[in-house]
Amino acid sequence: MLSRTADHLYWMSRYTERAENLARMLQVNVRMALLQRQSDEPDQSWAATLAMIGQLEAYRERYSAVTPERVVDFLAFDESNSGSIVRDLRAARENAHAVRGTLTSEQWETINSTWLEMRGHKLKDLSTDELIEFLEWVKFRSHLVRGVTHGTMLRDEGFNFTRIGTVLERADNTARILDVQLRLLAPGGVGQATRADYYKYSALLASVSAFEIYRRVYRDRITPARVAELLILRSDMPRSLHRCMNELVVYLGEVANDQSAETIRRAGALRSTLRYGRIDLILEEGVHEFLTGFLGRVRDIGRRIAEDFLVSTTG
């Protein structure tokens, strides 16, 4: 496959997944804010989210204070912000258009219609409930793109590069969501959750579509350690770090070339860290420290994938 085609497919899927994960980050913050209305707790999650995704400096250049309304507008609807949902969906559509002949008609129509519908949404038109519905819509459209891809695309190198982009972006964002929220919910370390924290941890799990899975796996009360274990180490949890790295190694193996051996080795080494990891050792090291190290290794793998297979190195 031409590297330019692989590049567009890879970034098409990364931008689609990135839009979904931004929606997930915003959704958990909105839900947490609703839970905090009856308390005097300062809402630090908005600034923490901006910092974790590298957008705090850009936000500060435009606004003097961090407020929920401005953060939502900046991260969801601001077309001048290259890291917003609207820009991500536009970038996904542009990359898809560049390789329209490689995609099925169903893929193209789904991605294109998502972008066209997105342009009709504005923050000023939305109540809190409607904002949550909009964020659910973003997630649903991402699910729809993936479903159409799985259901209609030939299992060739093009499909493999779309999956590489998806799982790499998902691993990065799951780690960021978990890191931000656990530091806010358990600043003194991942110990026992209080009864008052139950709904906050439930919101965190729901933000990564893991609440029902948690109840099936652990059955009883929610604890921070089990939340971390589920989202980091469980290979059967669709959005866990372990699951993402399992898939990444498989799809990298399918597209291996003469210069990708070291990239695949590093991805395999990271998968082994998760496969043989234990939550008690991660807690001893510190969840934040572990996730910071994981994100650094994921960035390195992403850089190496760009060098080994693609035209561009950033996105």
Image (cartoon, rainbow, N blue to C red):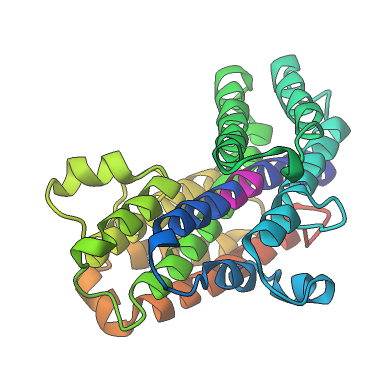
Q: Is residue 170 left or right of residue 200?
A: right
- Viewport quadrant of the C terminus: bottom right
Asked whether residue 236 is in view, the answer is no
Tell which residue pokes out farthest to the left in this image: 220
Q: Nearer the viewer, residue 181 or 94?
A: 181
Residue 286 on image: x %, y % = 34, 81
Question: Based on the displayed image, in which of its 4 quarters is residue 116 positioned?
Answer: top right
Total marks in image: 0
Q: Nearer the viewer, residue 31 or 239?
A: 31
Main SS, magenta residues: helix
Q: Is residue 294 left or right of residue 262?
A: left
Residue 223 on image: x %, y % = 21, 62
- Determine the residue positioned at 35% across, 45% down: 210
- Determine the residue positioned at 44% across, 48% down: 207
Residue 140 on image: x %, y % = 56, 30
Q: Nearer the viewer, residue 29 or 145?
A: 29
Residue 216 on image: x %, y % = 19, 40
- Viewport quadrant of the N terminus: top right
**246 magenta-colored:** no
Eyeballing the image, is 1 above or below 78?
A: above
Q: Which residues are magenta?
A: 17-22
Eyeballing the image, is 70 above or below 211?
A: below
Q: Is residue 116 left or right of residue 185?
A: right
- Determine the residue positioned at 26% across, 65% down: 224
Asked whether residue 313 is in view, the answer is yes
Q: Nearer the viewer, residue 193 or 311?
A: 193
Question: Based on the displayed image, in which of its 4 quarters is residue 136 positioned?
Answer: top right
